[in-house]
Amino acid sequence: MIIDFKNVSQHYAPRTQEKMKEVLLDPAGIGPAIHYYMVRGGTEQKNITVWEPGTISGEYIKTYGHYHVGDLSETYSIIYGQGVALLQKLAEDESGKMIPDMVEDFQAIPVKAGQVVFMPTKVGHLLVNTGQTYFVTADDSPVDFDDRDPSSFPGHADYELVKKMRGFAYYVVEHNGKPALKRNMLYKSIEKKEFNNLPVIK
Ligand SMILES: [Fe+2]
């Protein structure tokens, strides 16, 4: 196997509190300087993400969340810890464009080490660390090292729809020491919901 070492310095990217403010339940909440750490190698080498544990104004630390551009699915293997995967498919207009505030299908799936989560094409996704330890995953999405900022913002991912709505349709928050869901009221409608026994709180 021949490894091209010229891109090694581009593999790592941190996701900062400064950036995460855009999608937090409480943008003024106090959080760690870095919420999660990404080491991206691409489809063959895999991408590793490590989440800090903890909450910001009650919301568990999560990834920013994104939709894929084009026809691209992704598989996440949970390597360590426990969390919740959020998947949401937006409604589309006649031209097939996603409508930012109308969710067709929302799923919250509790996950732990050893499990695999499949993110189908067009389904927005993020993962939340609900445990006391680091939460670690490996995924197989591609990385194009010719992109401007390949590890922090890979070209296949669209973050703007999530930014516009200040997160996904539900936030994962701590309630009596356990994960619960809290509705993001900026979304106009959420048609199908699957919470997998996670409670919804006001
Ligand atoms: Fe993705």
Image (spheres, rainbow, N blue to C red):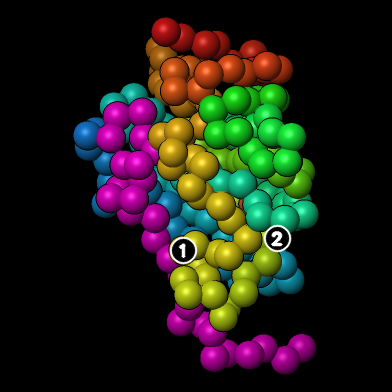
| One can see residue 91 in this view | yes
Q: Is residue 73 above or below residue 174?
A: below
Residue sitting at x 40%, y 12%: 176
Residue 139: x percent and y percent?
A: 66, 56
Mark 2: is the Cβ under 8 angstroms from ligand 1? Answer: no
Q: Position of residue 112 (x, y in %)?
A: 63, 37
Q: Residue at x 51, y 32 (%)?
A: 168
Q: Residue at x 62, y 70 (%)?
A: 143
Q: Residue 174 or 92: which is nearer the viewer?
A: 92
> Quick check: 155 above or below 185?
below
Q: Does 158 sit left or right of 111 as displayed?
A: left
Q: Is residue 68 left or right of residue 36?
A: right
Residue on which disc 1 sits: 152
Identify residue for label 2.
Answer: 140
Task: Name the image quarter holding the C terminus.
Answer: top left
Q: Earlier in the sequence, mark 2 or mark 1?
A: 2
Q: Residue at x 50, y 49 (%)?
A: 159
Residue at the limit of the structure toward the top, as seen here: 202
Q: Which residues are magenta?
A: 1-27
- CA–CA distance between discs 2 and 1? 15 Å
Badge 1 local density, few (<14 within 10 Å), some, or many (20+)? some
Give SS at disc 1. loop
Q: Quadrant of residue 47?
A: bottom right
Left/right placement of residue 80 relative to residue 26 reads: right
Q: Position of residue 197 (x, y in %)?
A: 64, 13
Q: Quadrant of the N terminus?
A: bottom right
How packed mark 2 is, by other alpha carbons closer than 10 Å (few <14, some 14-19, many 20 or more), is some
* Amino acid type at mark 2: Asp
Identified by mark 1, the residue type is Ser
**For the residue labelled by badge 2, is the local secondary structure a helix, a strand or a loop?**
loop
